[in-house]
Image (cartoon, rainbow, N blue to C red):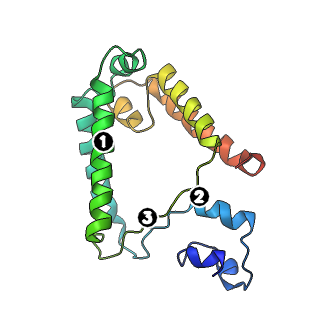
Amino acid sequence: MSKRDNIPNGVLPPHAQAEDSNTLTDYEVRSLDTMCVNDTALQHPWWYNLKYLAVGIVFGIVFVKAEIISWYRIQEMFRLQSFHMYGVIGSAVVVGAISVALIKRLGIKTIHGETVQFHKKKFNKGQVAGGVIFGLGWAMTGACPGPLFAQIGTGFFVVVVVLLSAVAGTWVYGYFRDRLPH
């Protein structure tokens, strides 16, 4: 059994799928980290994606009403003064874990009948450093990437600076990714 046998079809680039070699190149290994292996091959009209916009709007409203986007709530969390945000994050983890367990156990498929696949991820010490940097940025700005748009939508336009900084940071990482230890 080769290393390629563990990789789902369509994940590797076409030239790599055709090769007979049993070893993966560095590019192929890194591609596994960046590609969505559960991505659908179905094609839909553009308006089909409006459902995601609707869900995003509802999600943003829930964030606002639950005070998840509140800078003060985020500061309370990082100063260990309130359980509110820990309760929200903890309940999200529990709901996510139960959902994944049910999907695996019951073999639940997508709304289009496609199989949902879960792939093991390899731990990397860079994830710890990245998590620390992410947490520091979250604590300093009072903004996690999830609710940035909800914060902007509620009139906190200074958060546009945080959004542009997040985009710039993502670009810088992408630019230097090949030279970073993974």
Cβ–Cβ under 8 Å for marks 1 and 3: no
Q: CA distance from mark 1 to mark 2?
A: 24 Å
Question: Which residue is found at the position 33% from the left and 20% from the top?
Answer: 73
Q: Position of residue 54 (x, y in %)?
A: 26, 51
- The residue at 44%/28% (across/down) is 143
Q: Is residue 46 above or below residue 174?
A: below
Q: In terms of secondary structure, where does tag 3 sit?
A: loop
Q: Is residue 53 visible?
A: no
Q: Is residue 6 visible?
A: yes
Callout 3–callout 2 Cβ contact below 8 Å? no
Q: Is residue 76 above or below residue 27?
A: above
Could you tell me how far apart the alpha carbons at marks 3 and 2 are, in whole angstroms?
13 Å
x, y (%) of residue 173? 66, 43
Mark 3 and mark 2 lie on one chain; the one further toward the N terminus is 2
Residue type, mark 2 in image = Asp
Give the position of the N terminus as an image quadrant. bottom right
Residue located beneath label 2 in the image: 33
User: Which residue lies at the image location 44% right of the left edge and 23% below the top edge?
Assistant: 142
* Residue type at tag 1: Ala
**Label 3, residues with CA under 10 Å away: few <14, some 14-19, many ≥20:** few
In this figure, which residue is indicated by the disc labeled 1? Answer: 92
Q: Position of residue 37 (x, y in %)?
A: 49, 67
> Do callouts 1 and 2 mark residues in contact (Cβ within 8 Å)?
no
Q: Which residue is mark 3?
A: 118
Nearest to viewer (mark 3 / mark 2) = 3
In 3D space, how far apart are the residues under numbered discs 1 and 3 (Cα atoms)? 19 Å
- The residue type indicated by label 3 comes to Phe
First along the sequence among labels 1 and 3: 1
